[in-house]
Amino acid sequence: MPRSPRSVAVLLTAAALALAGCSGTAGSAPPLETSSSSAPASVQVPDTPMGNTVTWIIGQFESETDVTAEEWEERLHPDFLEQVPASALVSQINTSIRPAAPFTVTDYEEGELEAVATLAGALGEPFDLKVAIDDDGLIIGMLLAPVEEEERDPATSLGEVTERLDGLPGEVHYLISRDDEVLAERDAAVPAPLGSVFKLYVLGAVAEGVARGELAWDDTLIVTDEVKSLPSGVLQEEPDGTEVTVENAALKMISQSDNTATDMLIDAVGQDALGAAVVAMGNDEPELLRPFLTTQNMFELLWGDEDAAARWDGADVETREQIVSELNARPFTLTVEDAVMTETGWTRGVEWFASADDVSDAHAWLADAAQSDPVITEVLTESPGIQVDGDAWSEVAFKGGNSPGVVAGSWRGVSVDGSALTVVIQIATDDAAAAQEAMTELFGLTEDVFRLES
């Protein structure tokens, strides 16, 4: 982990590496029970400045009450806070990490200013906690990731990046471009599953509503029991009647992939506005996103109504609109216990679909809209999902997503010289476990692209 305060690691959830898909952050699905046959052996964290920081973080992970942003703001370097607000960080800790407590430290390695602790929780798989501090003891980097069996070898050329992308499981689509120049692509014009990358279109519809004066970023939305969806996110845990602004809901939708926030914004703009935004943002096959599914709709089709799911597969737009109308007419009663993360839905058409070209165009459209509305940039860049060189890149917009068998990531970085680098990668396989395992490589190769293009 780099020691420079300008290279700040983002807090990522242990299971999903911050892809933050529709059902993709840790805590989004029923946690996997760890074996109870034997307790993991523990190791001692040393009483050193670095070790004391790690011990404090683990204490936060095991807190019996919600941790607060104020506690973390005292520990985080200002450059970290510029990239990841303390409020976003503690939200992930409270919803995705604390439920797996207590934790046992099963391995520990320390340098003077950096350390890696392997943690085994009461629920879920073990994960690595990577921490870096500066000379004053402030945290400049923190990453939660699957336990590394061996150190990853970075790609040394764009050719190696594409070769390794081509070796990922299932159907692989990607587009890497710099401004108008395509650097690499594979089936970039072919529609593929998006996971929560679809939320870019929701943000576009909201931005259009704000631009037309039909909506305002400070308008109030109400969390109701009827609109609450499944994790990821935090709003589903809020009491009925909780108020959030449109801007706050948009921030949660993009940076935390909050599904309840997403459905609230879909309700706020309506189907007609969403359809118009999909077209305006350059999508070549907008009928694939008609009707525009809420996350509740998606979960019902995945794990709820088997008859609706059977009718959905291969149906025309009119039939699908009728199915969605039926789903919306009754209460949403699914819980995380109903989620079966090994069952893929995209092979039956249960997903949001668009091509890598479409996603690239959506990012470009949002970047243009942000010229007159900086809130859009704030929303898209709050959590970049990867580490980049802050001296080379002034901002990185990011939205990722995953669902069973689907992993997708999309980035648009603006370099200090003003050029834009876009990376869109989509993986779809009928092997849900293989898709999850591909996440680390997907994110690593994206970091390689940004490093090579610096």
Image (cartoon, rainbow, N blue to C red):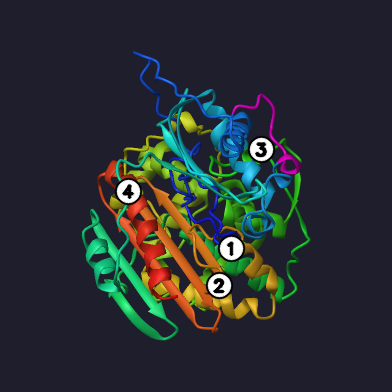
Answer left or right for 17 relative to 263.
Answer: left
Which residue extends farthest top?
Answer: 37
Which mark is drawn over residue 225? 3
Q: Within 10 angstroms of label 4, few (less than 14), some, or many (20 or more) residues?
A: few
Q: Amino acid at mark 3?
A: Asp
Q: Is residue 139 magenta?
A: no
- The residue sitting at 39% across, 23% down in the picture is 34
Against 100, residue 171 (above or below) is below
> Residue beneath label 4, please?
151
Prevailing SS of the magenta stretch: loop
Q: Mark 2 or mark 4, which is nearer the start of the sequence?
A: 4
Q: Within 10 angstroms of label 2, few (less than 14), some, or many (20 or more) residues?
A: few
Q: Amino acid at mark 1?
A: Arg
Instruction: Work out how far the residue at label 4 is from the one at label 2, CA to CA, in angstroms.
Output: 25 Å
Q: Amino acid at mark 2?
A: Asp
Q: Amino acid at mark 4?
A: Glu
Residues at circles 2 and 1 in contact by the CB criterion of under 8 Å: yes
Q: Within 10 angstroms of label 3, few (less than 14), some, or many (20 or more) residues?
A: some
Q: Mark 1 or mark 2, which is nearer the start of the sequence?
A: 1
Dividing the picture into quadrants, the one containing residue 187 is: bottom left
Q: Mark 2 or mark 3, which is nearer the start of the sequence?
A: 3
Residue 268 in the image: state x and y as whole percent: 67, 58
Which mark is drawn over residue 391? 2
> Residue beneath label 1, please?
6
The residue tagged with tag 4: helix, strand or loop?
Answer: loop
* 3 vs 1, front mark: 1
Q: Mark 1 or mark 3, which is nearer the start of the sequence?
A: 1
Against 287, residue 347 (above or below) is above
Instruction: Work out how far the residue at label 3 is from the one at label 2, CA to CA, in angstroms.
Output: 45 Å
Q: Which residues are magenta?
A: 62-71
